[in-house]
Image (cartoon, coloured by chain):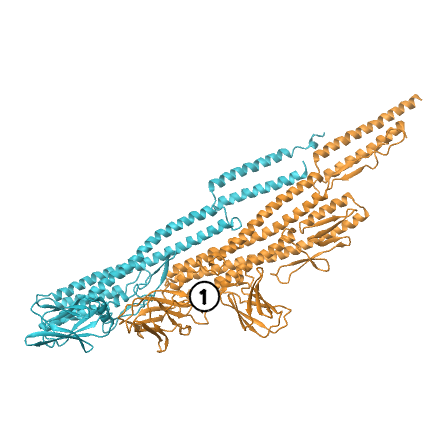
């Protein structure tokens, strides 16, 4: 055998052993591609997949975090809605009171308690200790009550964007506007009775006949004054706005009710106004739920004893009922909005899991070792190496010199 | 001479020849593993015919031939050089590949950093999560430093190895020259030729060589057209390197003639190619460190940090360097500021600026793309602003490195989690805000914030607030449903115009900040009523919007970046180097096979086959015995004759 037989055999053994080593490391690490040098395309594909898996995991963490806040928010709003329903029934009881023995004081106290509970709900915190309804000032208690009993909002309406799924960003910050910015009255107009009224009439905004005109009234600054007069046994009213008469006419009180249509808004006049009675119809403005409740509470605490005073109380309560309806719809709206985000989180969560699994499968297909195949290859390589060694061992004995005596 | 005496002398010449044959076999067997050794064979020749018919035996001493093949040997030299070159380059590229994808993987650590930022957006008040992000940033910094460290170590390793290789190659060149000299005294000596071939084979490991044999067996050696050994002796190699990171140059002889070495020109060529590949990889890594730093720092400036201040840079890289050409004659100096790091040339080579009659011209090394910059005092080039002071003269040049040593020098400006600019710069609230912080909302309209975003240009119709008012509390008042004005707390009107709805307020970032030129825009929906007020207050520290924006940098499509995004950029760098490494590995494996084939071809001609030698040995032994028998027989015959007399 020439000396190249030995060098070539040595080189072949090294190659075979290197391949075996490679297969063994594949088996040990479970990866066929450990660096871009092994297979750049596969490595990069798997790197992208792994990065997306990380992003998806991060988004799933985000989903969990937002979920906690939003669930705290929707559950609070649900409880607040129940309180509003109670408040509504208190107001209705007082308005429809036929028994003189109605305990207004007890109702007033109930209303006061509802107010305190609403304040506590509005200041609720999520499991992380963040205030739920303070916008992006999560460390600030959003609602504070001053010595006079009025509640102010100290948060903001800032936005906190969070990506919950690739390309899907939601605002995770709930703010206190839901408790503060509900419009007074029926959303267009808020009616108050003149303090010197002597009649038993109440005037309540009931509906809208012309959306555009009503909208213009609401965004404007001019209140309407409705004044009653009596001439020759006929009762009539005049409605003026900014000194200009916008309506008027006789009032038939025999049916104990009459409809007035002013600036596209319908008002129901109940009871009997006296000449000289006035009502002021103001455009709706944001009125906090706390001031709404405290208005009801104070009206109930001094319902008055004369029929005129009782009418004043009814007027306040009737107007407040409109405000309660506004807040009921605001709460359900805010709750629905949070619900939409929660639903989208649930959907994203499922989609993210699917995507993440697909990424894992793809990454494994790109760089993972095919274990059964690797095992087979190891068997083959080992057998091949053994055969080569055997062949070398028998061939190297072939030397003529060993036969020369 | 004739008769019995003649037969005896003839047989004696056979004894001499066959013992010479045995000696040749012995020499062959002894040298079968000697490098450069070519198998020798006995070439007996009869002594010239005598007039009396029978021959006069074998010429003494018998000739011995060396089985040399210049062509096969040259193939071995070439294959050796190629294989060694490929090995050097493959080893360097494998280190580069490992630097990017092995320990301290930059891609995965960056991915983790951005993923954790994304989670932080959902819980901006969680101090632990903010600390995690800072820890991620530190890990990312270490990954850059570790990769850069591994590449810088490779520079030193290659430089040292080059010195060693040059020393070894010079020793061999000296030996070739010495053998040449000896061949003048004993032309074509087999032993000297064997030594020559062994030395040349060893030399071919360092540089690719071409040989021209002379009649006495001496050789002239050249590499890439440069003479290394001629009749006057060896032109020794030397190596020069101006700085540890500049490409070394190999020269030959006292005149320092540059030697042109490709990546298949022996281990010297492979090492030099490996050096260049390392240098390019480091340059692109530096560029990426710069791009990442630029984008993150810009995003930092787009938001507010935990102290309610506009975010300061999070990452820090060494300042750009400007190196004037030593031949400059003008008085100009350049001051470089990076304005948009991702727009810098991604090969990391920076620019060469030259001043000519038409003003300044910038050239990107390697790609040779040129940009005409004019002659103004401030030059604007992709991603950079260059201030020129003094007066340049035509022919003056400057080398600009925008991100020198960025990967190795990358650092965090602070490890305090409060430096993360997680929050939006402003929070929008309907109504006014009293000094006590209470919101007073008497708006009749329905304007509310829907979303906010950072833009290079405000949306058409948006109210634009100049950057000088950034950070002040602002109040937007609708003077009518279709007109607005924005005032500061002091009452100064900073913006006013027609409100068309469907847009928002765009507040410019301050001019000195990293986000200069961009706008934070809040989009408003709903219809305003006259007198409505919207307050914009700096703060809202628990907004995660800016963390969300920063997290999206990783995958956000950015046409200025080579891979289409930040992630794409690092993957394209990793992929490029990985593919280079794979190609070099294949080349190395192929060249090793070629070398084996060339060696086998040479061995088939010049190698020693022990079986053949054994056969020859038997042949010589038996022939020797036969010749001895002839002498013995002749002696017996002679004795018979003497007894008969």
Chain of the residue under the numbered disc 1 shown in the image: B
- On the rendered image, what quadrant is the C terminus of chain A found in? top right
Q: Nearer the viewer, residue B200 or B569?
A: B569
Q: Which residue is mark 1?
A: B298
Residue B390, compared with residue B9, is above or below; it is below
Residue B63 location (% of width, % of height): 80, 38
Give the left or right position of residue B231, taking residue A250 as reference: right
Residue shown at the point (35%, 53%) measured from the top left:
A349
Q: What color was chain A assigned in the picture?
A: cyan
Q: What color was chain B assigned in the picture?
A: orange
Neighbor class of circle 1 (other Cα within 10 Å; few <14, some 14-19, many 20+) is many
Number of labels in the image equals 1
Residue B58 location (% of width, % of height): 83, 33
Give the left or right position of residue B51, taking residue B96 as reference: right
Residue B196 location (% of width, % of height): 74, 47
Q: Quadrant of residue B48?
A: top right
Residue B304 in view of the camera? no
């Amino acid at each position: 055998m020439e000396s190249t037989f030995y060098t070539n055999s040595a080189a072949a053994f090294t190659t075979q052993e290197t391949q075996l080593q490679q297969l063994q490391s594949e088996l040990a690490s479970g990866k066929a591609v450990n660096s871009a040098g092994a297979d750049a395309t596969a490595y990069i594909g798997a790197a992208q997949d792994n990065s997306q898996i990380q992003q998806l995991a991060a988004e799933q963490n985000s989903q969990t975090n937002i979920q906690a806040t939003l669930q705290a928010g929707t559950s609070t709003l649900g409880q607040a809605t129940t309180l509003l329903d109670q408040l509504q029934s208190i107001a209705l009881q007082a308005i429809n009171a036929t028994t003189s023995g109605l305990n207004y004081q007890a109702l007033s106290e109930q209303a006061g308690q509802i107010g305190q509970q609403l304040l506590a709900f509005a200041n609720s915190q999520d499991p992380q200790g963040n205030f739920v309804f303070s916008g992006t000032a999560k460390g600030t208690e959003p609602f504070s009550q001053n010595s006079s009993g009025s509640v102010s909002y100290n948060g903001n309406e800032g936005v906190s964007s969070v990506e919950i799924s690739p390309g899907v960003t939601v605002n995770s910050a709930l703010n206190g506007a839901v408790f503060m910015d509900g419009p007074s009255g029926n959303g267009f107009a808020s009616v108050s009775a003149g303090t010197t009224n002597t009649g038993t009439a109440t005037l309540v905004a009931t509906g809208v006949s012309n959306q555009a005109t009503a909208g213009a009234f609401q965004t404007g600054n001019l209140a309407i004054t409705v004044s009653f007069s009596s001439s020759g046994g006929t009762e009539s009213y005049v409605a003026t706005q900014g000194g200009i008469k916008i309506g008027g006419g006789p009032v038939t009180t025999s049916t104990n009710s009459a409809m007035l249509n002013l600036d596209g808004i319908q008002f129901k006049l109940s009871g009997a106004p006296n000449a000289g009675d006035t009502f002021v119809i103001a455009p709706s403005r944001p009125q906090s739920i706390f001031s709404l409740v405290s208005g009801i509470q104070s009206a109930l605490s001094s319902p008055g004893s004369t029929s005129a005073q009782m009418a004043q109380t009814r007027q306040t309560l009737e107007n407040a009922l409109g405000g309660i309806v506004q807040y009921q719809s605001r709460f359900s709206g805010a709750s629905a909005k949070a619900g939409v985000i929660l639903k989208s989180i649930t959907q994203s969560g499922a989609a993210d899991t699917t995507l993440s699994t697909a990424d894992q499968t793809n990454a494994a297909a790109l760089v993972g070792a095919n274990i059964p195949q690797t095992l087979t290859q190891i068997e083959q390589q080992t057998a091949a190496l053994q055969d080569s060694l055997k062949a070398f061992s028998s061939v190297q004995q072939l030397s003529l010199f060993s036969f020369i005596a | 001479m004739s008769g019995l005496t003649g037969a005896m002398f003839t047989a004696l010449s056979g004894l001499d020849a066959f013992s010479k044959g045995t000696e040749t076999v012995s020499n062959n067997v002894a040298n079968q593993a000697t490098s450069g050794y070519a198998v020798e064979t006995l070439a007996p020749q009869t002594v010239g015919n005598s007039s009396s018919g029978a021959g006069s035996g074998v010429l003494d001493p018998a000739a011995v031939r060396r089985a040399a093949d210049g062509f096969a040997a040259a193939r071995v030299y070439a294959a050796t050089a190629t294989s060694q070159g490929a090995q050097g380059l493959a080893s360097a590229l494998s280190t580069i590949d490992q630097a990017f994808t092995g320990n301290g993987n930059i891609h995965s650590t960056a991915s983790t950093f951005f993923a954790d930022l994304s989670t932080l957006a959902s819980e901006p008040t969680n101090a632990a999560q903010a600390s995690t992000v800072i820890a991620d940033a530190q890990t990312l910094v270490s990954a850059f430093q570790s990769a850069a460290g591994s590449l810088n170590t490779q520079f030193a390793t290659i430089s040292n190895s080059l010195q060693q290789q040059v020393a070894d190659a010079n020793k061999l060149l000296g030996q070739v020259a010495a053998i040449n000299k000896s061949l003048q005294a004993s032309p074509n000596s087999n032993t000297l030729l064997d030594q020559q071939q062994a030395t040349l084979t060893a030399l071919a490991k360092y540089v690719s060589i071409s040989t021209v044999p002379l009649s006495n067996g001496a050789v002239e050696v050249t590499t890439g057209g440069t003479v290394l050994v001629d009749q006057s002796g060896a032109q020794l190699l030397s190596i020069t390197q101006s700085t540890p990171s500049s490409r070394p140059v190999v020269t030959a002889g006292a005149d320092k003639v540059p030697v042109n070495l490709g990546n298949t020109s022996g281990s010297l060529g492979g090492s030099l190619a490996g050096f260049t590949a390392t240098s390019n990889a480091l340059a692109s890594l530096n560029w990426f460190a710069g791009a990442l730093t630029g984008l993150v720092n810009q995003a930092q400036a787009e938001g507010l940090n935990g102290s309610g201040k506009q975010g300061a840079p999070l990452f820090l890289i060494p300042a750009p360097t400007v190196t004037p050409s030593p031949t400059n004659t003008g008085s100009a100096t350049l001051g470089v500021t990076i304005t948009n790091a991702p727009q810098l040339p991604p090969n990391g080579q920076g620019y060469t600026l030259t001043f000519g009659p038409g003003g300044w011209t910038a050239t990107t090394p390697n790609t040779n793309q040129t940009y005409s910059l004019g002659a103004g005092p401030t030059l604007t080039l992709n991603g950079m602003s260059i201030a020129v002071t003094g007066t340049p003269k035509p022919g003056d040049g400057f080398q600009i490195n925008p991100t020198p040593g960025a990967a190795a020098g990358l650092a965090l400006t602070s490890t305090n989690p409060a430096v993360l600019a997680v929050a939006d710069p402003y929070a929008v609230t309907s109504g006014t805000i009293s000094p006590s912080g209470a919101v007073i909302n008497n708006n009749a309209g329905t304007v509310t914030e829907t979303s906010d975003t950072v833009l290079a240009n405000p949306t058409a119709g948006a109210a634009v607030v100049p950057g000088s008012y950034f950070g002040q509390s602002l109040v937007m008042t609708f003077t009518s449903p279709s007109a607005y004005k924005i005032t500061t707390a002091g009452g100064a009107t900073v913006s006013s115009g027609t409100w068309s709805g469907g847009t928002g307020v765009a507040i410019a970032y301050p001019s000195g900040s990293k986000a200069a030129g961009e706008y934070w825009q809040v989009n408003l929906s709903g219809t305003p009523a006259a007198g409505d007020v919207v307050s914009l207050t700096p703060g809202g520290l628990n907004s995660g919007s800016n963390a969300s924006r920063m997290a999206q940098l990783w995958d956000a499509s950015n046409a200025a970046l080579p891979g289409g995004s930040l992630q794409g950029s690092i993957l394209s760098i990793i992929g490029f180097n990985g593919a280079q490494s794979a190609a070099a590995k294949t080349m190395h494996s192929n060249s090793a096979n070629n070398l084996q084939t060339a060696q086998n071809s040479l061995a088939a001609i010049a190698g020693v086959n022990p079986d053949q030698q054994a056969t020859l040995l038997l042949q010589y032994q038996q022939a020797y015995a036969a010749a001895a028998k002839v002498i013995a027989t002749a002696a017996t015959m002679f004795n018979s004759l003497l007894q008969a007399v």
